[in-house]
């Protein structure tokens, strides 16, 4: 175990030496956060249709910090710079290629994000998660309604039973040693089961 911890520390130190991404974090931090986001979106948000199921799956991932916020629950992992939020969400909208606006009412949603992951990477993760289900004919993606971009450039995919969008969120990270806080606006992958 000590050897594994030493290897992890060395890997993170090397990752920190890489040039910063568009988010200001190292490429290594962005890759780790992106992998964790993809796993969490699929394991918690996509594979569980109910808030209770999502909550059970989130607890099984053993996030170090859990807090109630605005009628929802936020799970965060500072080590991987990722967070998960399960709770109420506002209406989601995109404009498709034909210029038509598609609106989906709010409800209970499940979102995963990281200040280390930018819009391009978040859109790619969303597509990578949906692609196998589109190919295998998964019932989760029955009844396509449309796809498009939100005003920030985040992808949106709308189906009869599921909506996946990449809206922007704000995360504030606080340095416990100094108390200094820094806010980051970044995309999240949001899933709402209709």
Image (cartoon, rainbow, N blue to C red):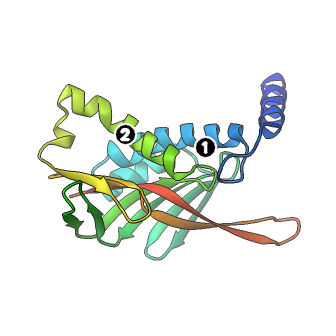
Farthest right residue?
Answer: 177
- What is the x, y in percent for residue 8? 77, 30
How many residues crowd around disc 1 within 10 Å: few (fewer than 14), some, or many (20 or more)? many
Q: Quadrant of residue 150?
A: bottom left
The residue carrying mark 1 is 33
Q: Is residue 73 above or below residue 112?
A: below
Q: Position of residue 24 (x, y in %)?
A: 71, 53
Q: Quadrant of the C terminus?
A: bottom left
Is 46 situated left or right of 189 in this image?
left
The disc, 1 or 2, on the residue closer to the chain's N-terminal end is 1
Dot 1: element:
helix
**Front residue (pair 173, 4):** 173
Q: Is residue 53 left or right of residue 147?
A: right
Q: Crowdedness of circle 2 by 10 Å Cα count: few (<14), some, many (20+)? A: some
Across and down, in percent, residue 88 comes to 36, 70
Residue 18 visible somewhere in the drawing: yes
Task: Using the numbered discs, state the Cα–Cα distance from disc 1 to disc 2 in whole angstroms.
Answer: 17 Å
Query: Which residue sits furthest left?
Result: 143
Query: Extreme bottom residue here?
Result: 70
Q: Residue shown at 45%/40% (left/top)?
A: 125
Q: Residue at x 18, y 63 (%)?
A: 100
Identify the residue at the far top of this view: 3
Q: Say which of 102 and 135 sits in front.
A: 102
Above or below, 102 against 121 in this view is below
Q: Residue at x 22, y 67 (%)?
A: 103
The front one of 98 and 160 is: 98
- Quarter the N terminus occupies: top right
Give the residue pinned by disc 2. 127
Residue drawn 58% across and 49% down? Answer: 117
């Amino acid at each position: 175990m000590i050897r594994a911890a030493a290897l992890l520390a060395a890997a993170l130190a090397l990752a920190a030496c890489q040039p910063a991404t568009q988010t200001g974090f190292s490429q290594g931090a962005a890759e780790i956060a992106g992998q964790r986001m993809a796993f969490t979106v699929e394991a918690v948000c996509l594979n569980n249709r109910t808030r209770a199921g999502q909550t059970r799956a989130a607890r099984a991932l053993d996030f170090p910090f859990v807090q109630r916020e605005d009628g929802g629950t936020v799970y965060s992992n500072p080590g991987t710079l990722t967070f998960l939020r399960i709770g109420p969400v506002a209406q989601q909208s995109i404009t498709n290629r034909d210029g038509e606006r598609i609106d989906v009412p709010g409800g209970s949603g499940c979102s995963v994000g990281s200040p280390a992951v930018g819009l391009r990477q978040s859109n790619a993760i969303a597509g990578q998660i949906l692609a196998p289900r589109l190919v295998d004919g998964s019932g989760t993606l029955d009844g396509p309604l449309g796809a498009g971009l939100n005003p920030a450039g985040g992808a949106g995919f709308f189906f009869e039973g599921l909506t996946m969008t990449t809206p922007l969120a704000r995360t504030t990270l606080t340095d416990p040693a100094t108390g200094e806080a820094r806010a980051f606006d970044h995309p999240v992958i949001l899933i709402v089961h209709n």
